[in-house]
Amino acid sequence: MISFLLNIVDPPAKKVEKDADLDLVLRVQAGELSAFGELIDRHQRPVYGIVSRMVTSRDDADDLVQDVFVSAYKAIGSFRRDAKFSTWLHTIAVNTTLKRLKMMKRRSTVSIDDPDTGLAEIIRADDGPSPAESLQNREQNEAVRRAIDSLPDKQRMVVIMHYFEQHSCEEIAEILKCSVGTVWSRLHYACKKLRGELGWLEQGF
Amino acid sequence: MKCNKCQKYFIPYVEGTLPERLQKPVEKHLSACKSCAEELAQLRQTVDVLRQTEYTAMEPAFDLRSRVMAQIAREPVRVRKSWWGAYSAAAAALLLFAVVIVSVEPVFYRVRQSSQHEYSAKRTAMKSVSPDTQALSKMPEMDERTGKPTSVVKSPAPEIKASAKGYGIKPEGTKEIAKARKSSDEFYADITPPPAAPEHPHDMAQAAYGGGQQALQAPSPMAQAERVESVPKNISVEFEDRALGKADNSKVLELERKLREFPNSRTVLMELLNAYRDAGRSEDEYAIAERLTKLDADNPQYWFARAQAAERAGKTLLAAEAYRQAIQLKIPEPDLGLAESRLEVLEKN
């Protein structure tokens, strides 16, 4: 009886990993705007990691990341603590990016991601080859990046999140609000398509 | 285990994260199925390539924090409270009050109509069950619109006037119509009758003013002048503004502000180009298209957009040149066909 009452008064801790951002989130929800600045500093790099690999230019990436954080601020009142803040933020980043890409394809005569027109090529002002990259590696890397850019948006997103942002399939499933089987399936089809784009894979490298 | 089920687990199997209970069935299938084993080997190779590929993300902008905070300060952004928060009860009450005020007359109309249907049903039932025509004759026929006996019809139908007030149509318009009509029959003879249970303000406007729907669609720049003519004068200013696309001006201003912040953002440039096109600002549209082609001179889609903008702005020579560029850069179908036909027309002229 006593333990039952104790469970009501002081329930046992949830099995969810303790969220290091929770304190800041609570302060933002209470109206402390500066706490949100701290959250931006903590999470800007992973958000750029997702967004900047999905769009073609520096300005587009900056614009989109800014929109992601503003949207997160507007919605932070509805953040429930049943997921980590980073997961929730990455969901916003993914949805904002996919929505923007879809809108651009639908509304304009210009197909931003049409590989045939070369629009899928990355134009990065600050992405030159690293000194350690040999010429062969550089060409290979570029070919793989181009092939990744030609994937459908949803497949590209999971490839980027899994192989370049190091999210596990379970984390990606939580972010995309789908089953882990769906994530596996998208990765599988993405790899099949990449293999088709990269003919030299047949010969090894 | 069948092939399609086994292949579902290839990714975690290759990465070593497949649950133990599934490993044995997968391995058993792979040892027996050559094509799946080959598929797995190819997948493993592709995954290895991906793991070895360098795909650097962009460095975060040094001023991201300040720009985000500035945008939050600029916009009237409030942290959205949870729907079940302290203010929800007051907000819900206010919303309910507004809904009641706006919808009370149509509700009465529907209630009247449903009671009319009930009445008709009773009458029919009496007709079929009781051959006593004398009893039937005591129940007069009812007018479906007014819910009153057909021999006594007054004009105009009060529900039109009431909903006109609710849906932004000037009451004066309906009074003018009412004065000109002697009976509701004449009233309905000259206009499109309202739907039985209109559910949207737009339906009420259409019912009252016939061709009003045309005015409420987003006008194309070329037909803008004609659309203005079709908007009845007694529609409220709000409807007229919406019909002319003036509500889009704020979007244009917002995009222009964004462009000042991100002058080379293709996304913003494309959105602004579309916004100018929708607003009929063909000179501005052309300027943006020109900028896009300067940012990426090898992009046929940008040249195509520039050609179309030039045509809309009346710059036929520049349009022809831009179409040529788009065709030379191998713009894909169906834009290729369109570019070729437009170029032919422009060259003839």
Image (cartoon, rainbow, N blue to C red):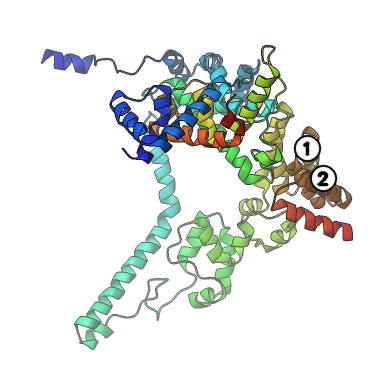
Give the answer, above or below, for where A173 lies relative to B316: above
Give the answer, above or below, for where B266 lies relative to B307: above
In this view of the protein, can residue B290 be seen by the observer? Answer: yes
Residue A102 in the figure: left or right of residue A1: right
In this view of the protein, can residue A72 be seen by the observer? Answer: no
The residue sitting at the left extreme is: A1
Judging by the rendered image, the residue that carries numbered circle 2 is B325
Kindly identify the amino acid type of the residue bearing the numbered disc 1.
Asp
Chain name for mark 1: B
Chain name for mark 2: B
Q: Residues within 10 Å of mark 1 (few under 14, many from 20)?
A: some
Give the answer, above or below, for where A137 lies relative to B229: above
| Residue A38, percent from left and from top | 53, 13
Position of the C terminus of chain B by quadrant: bottom right
Kindly identify the amino acid type of the residue bearing the numbered disc 2.
Gln
Judging by the rendered image, the residue that carries numbered circle 1 is B298
Q: Quadrant of residue A176?
A: top left
Of mark 2 and mark 1, the one earlier in the sequence is 1
Give the answer, above or below, for where B264 lies relative to A135: below
Q: Secondary structure at mark 2?
A: helix
Residue at image coords 55%, 15%: A37
| Residue B221, percent from left and from top | 73, 53
In the depicted view, which residue is nearer to us: B278 or A85? A85
Q: Secondary structure at mark 1?
A: loop
Residue B306 in the figure: left or right of residue A171: right
